[in-house]
Image (spheres, coloured by chain):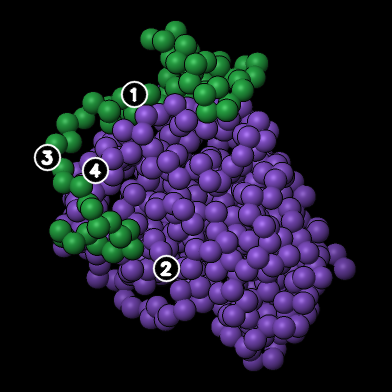
Chain colours: A green, B purple
Amino acid sequence: MSDDFESFAKAGLPLQGVELEDGDLDVLKLLHAVLSPSIDALKAADLSSIAAELDLDPSRAPHEG
Amino acid sequence: MTQPQDLGLRSQASAIASGELDPGDLLQGTLSRLGERDGRLNSIPVRFPERSLEMLEDAPSGPLHGVPIAIKDMYTLPWRGMFNGTAHELLPPGESGMYRLLRDAGAVIIGVTNQHYLGMGTTGIASAYGPAANPWHLDHCAGGSSGGSAAAVGARLVAGSIGSDTGGSSRLPAAYCGVVGLKLTFGGVPRGGYLGQNSQLSAPGIFGRDSGDVRLLTEAVLRRRLPAGSGSGLRVGLVRTPYWDNIDPEVESACQTAIDATGWKRVDVLIEGTEHAQAAGAVLSGSALGSSFNAAVVREAEPLTRALIHEMLLWPATLIPRADRIRAQLRRSVARAFADCDVMAWPTSPAPAPPISSPILQLPDGTVPADPANLRQATLANLTGLPGLSAPVGLSSAGLPIGLQFHAPWGAEAALLDAAEHLETVTERQHVDAVPPIGREVTVR
């Protein structure tokens, strides 16, 4: 898994104009290990029963109440 | 005799208005104090005495006439662009909405406060200006990202300051530094010239020593009165899971004791979607970052911030609508919860400020980095748009402040301030009147 992520990062970041420096990948892998469980859970969650708030206005309560 | 810069915001404003205090003396006294005490604290690294004096000379009459206010590095000023804690000007000089509000209220901007690099951290240890220190212990974090704004008020360098809050960035440093910090409801202040203008999570933050000072400063920036009401008969919602889980025992005890003292009716509240709130907040925060930095800013970031940016760049865009669904779920759920309670409460940060040299927390379930643990406590207000306030409720055995945060419905800043004022009353102001050692230093003239 870690190797997969490293390959993904090495391939994906340069496409976005990011040049990785010495040590960047090591820190990135550590941070990824902390963050990825919650991100993966969000990816996998069944959200089909939650309606989107199409007219979002964060300054007010949602219209749906 | 008390020096004018020791006075709180209300006292400074009223003394100037009555003619008892010369605002020029207050400005010079404040600048002198910054020179004397802000060395290792590093809370207001950018000062411009000539510009401050010009503001004073041109200051209109207003609720803050002649009162020095410090402002975070996320707002543009006519003479200085926005740097956001980096070495680069990210927005050019100009009149931000916040600058205009402060100017029109008669305030004098005394300097730009330190902050976490790009606002991307809750400790304040990474900044082009160097770390901001905690007024209660200079080896500990001031918090972030608005750490300098909180530290400056806590150390009695200024009586009021402005920050911002995209992920607890005002409430968390307020808790760390023992001051009152208020995140406004989303959208209450014109967003031009503000880094968070593209974010749907970000709102300005207001700092003061107590709820009365924060009320005065908030009224000035919202341009409306927030009449004080009684905070004695509130119903307080306690969201046990996740916000009271895995909390440092001293923090939990201080927060619980404070709530006990209020006499409020307690209601257990369940908020749906909190298990994904932190991830949703990170995704939506990351989605708004693109316009706020360039390659040089990323290259010069300290390794952890750089890694966080890299990590966010690797997240698929398909996460954004999923995060939006979570936000919708949370907003509907808190709206329903406020039918049964007036405010919701839980510890602002799960532990007191960690050392600058090692920003990790020792919690009952183990050792964790400060940022994710802090964000768990803070993100709900940013995702929903609610106002939130952190109030000091005690000191840890190590002498570091502990904060309790409240949330109220959209636009109900007055209810938060009423709650905080009631808390101050029932605790005989012992927490808001506590002065850190750096604030008790005697100036020799």
Give the residue type that dot 1 points to.
Answer: Pro
Q: CA distance from mark 3 to mark 1?
A: 22 Å
Question: Foreground mark, 2 or 4?
Answer: 4
Q: Which mark is residue B325?
A: 4
The residue depicted at 39 percent of the width and 53 percent of the height is B200
Mark 4 closeness class: few <14, some 14–19, many ≥20 residues within 10 Å: many
> Cα distance, mark 2 to mark 4?
24 Å
Q: Which residue carries the number 2 mark?
A: B188
Depicted B84 relative to depicted B302: above or below: below
In this view, A61 is above or below B86: below
Please report contact status of discs 2 and 1: CB closer than 8 Å, yes or no.
no
Q: Quadrant of the N terminus of chain B?
A: bottom right
Same chain, labels 1 and 4: no
**Mark 3 on the same chain as mark 4:** no
Q: Which residue is mark 1?
A: A37
Three-letter code for the amino acid on which mark 2 is drawn: Gly
- Cα distance, mark 2 to mark 3? 32 Å
State the CA–CA distance, disc 1 to disc 4: 19 Å
Q: Nearer the viewer, residue B351 or B56?
A: B56
Q: Which mark is residue A49?
A: 3
Residue B23, image x, y percentages: 73, 81
- Asked if marks 2 and 4 touch (Cβ < 8 Å), the reply is no
Q: Residues within 10 Å of mark 3 (few under 14, many from 20)?
A: few
